[in-house]
Amino acid sequence: MTALLAAENLGHAYGRRVALGDVSLGVAPGQVLSILGPNGGGKTTLLKLLLGLARPQSGRVLLDGQDMAGLSAKNVARRLAYVPQNHRPAFAYAVLEVVLMGRLPHKPFWFRFGKADEALALAALERLGIGHLARRPYTDLSGGERQLTLIARALAQDAAVLILDEPASGLDYGAQLRLLERLRALADEGRAIVQSTHFPDHALWIGGRAALLRRGRIIAEGPADQVINEKNLQRLYDCPIGVESLPGGGRICAPRNLGRPAPAEDSAPISAISAGRDKRQ
Ligand SMILES: Nc1ncnc2c1ncn2[C@@H]1O[C@H](COP(=O)(O)OP(=O)(O)OP(=O)(O)O)[C@@H](O)[C@H]1O
């Protein structure tokens, strides 16, 4: 399948600090690409380049086959929507107004939002199950409601590619699962979705592809259920993580050490330390 958004040999540095080196990947319509990696691995830098918010120092980003460097900001904004992490606006816009902002790239300089725009924005909110929030101030919403509002804004923008920076961060467990389901449904409608995430499970559950980014380099890229394995997770996060198959299908990550009794030599000093502390008190 042809990639709608692709990175070709991207490289980027901040001064002398190389944040990204020779990164190539792509996402096709109907696909989800999850970018995983440790803190400082280069995920945000990669998203910034994919969004055209920073120019790559080497390589290029292709949007529907065209070099993004040659496209106007408005042209990019019509096709590519961004859902940032922990978005906190300065003004208490109504939720509907925040979603309407997604229509801006489709408007001329002297625009006024019309009934059709409002209908589109309301439909996007309904689609995400938060139509009842339309008149509420955005600043009053919970983290999960804000995240859904921004996804609704991306839908109103009618962009073919959605880029989300850690969309599940700060959401409760149920909200995380519902968010993943909604993203999967949006991909199934033909959108290309790129998400960065700190949860390998999320990449497994949403399916599609995964790119593992460590020290600015892709160490593995491919179908999520193939590249998210014990060996790659150990290399990525520097700790032992198993990947177990579930009886009903699907896979789940499980830390190898947590929840297991500590070896005898480790447990002895803890009681000795607390005993010693008791004596000192
Ligand atoms: N504006 C900047 N100036 C200098 N160095 C930067 C800047 N932004 C990022 N870096 C460095 O580039 C590297 C990659 O950072 P980046 O933010 O892309 O990683 P990340 O994978 O998104 O990390 P996290 O998971 O912690 O958000 C890190 O070493 C970071 O310190």
Image (tube, helix red, strand yellow):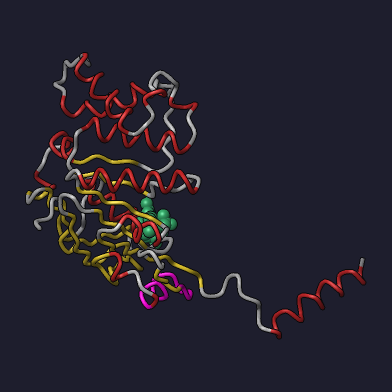
Q: Residue at x 44, y 41 (%)?
A: 86
The quadrant where residue 25 appears: bottom left
| Secondary structure mainly formed by the magenta segment | helix
Splitting the image into 4 quarters, where does residue 161 fall?
A: top left
Q: Quadrant of the N terminus?
A: bottom left
Task: Tell me the quarter of the picture where residue 208 sits.
Answer: bottom left
Q: Which residues are magenta?
A: 231-241
Q: Position of residue 251 (x, y in %)?
A: 38, 66
Q: Which residue is located at x 45 percent, y 48 percent? A: 169
Q: Residue furthest left?
A: 65
- Dividing the image into four quarters, tell me where ligand 1 lies: bottom left
Residue 76, image x, y percentages = 16, 39
Q: Is residue 272 above or below residue 61?
A: below
Where residue 130 appears, x then y in whole percent?
39, 29
Which residue in the rendered view is the most extreme toward the front? Answer: 248
Q: Tally the marks.
A: 0
Which residue shows up at 32% across the image and 41% down it?
A: 83
Quarter of the rendering occupied by the C terminus: bottom right
Q: Specify whether 125 is left or right of 66.
A: right
Tell me, yes or no, whether the highlighted magenta stretch contains residue 265: no
Q: Nearer the viewer, residue 244 or 15?
A: 244
Q: Is residue 87 left or right of residue 75?
A: right
Most extreme residue toward the bottom is 265
Q: Position of residue 82 (x, y in %)?
A: 28, 41
Q: Which residue occupies the foreground of this view, 181 or 55?
A: 181
Q: Is residue 118 above or below residue 217?
A: above
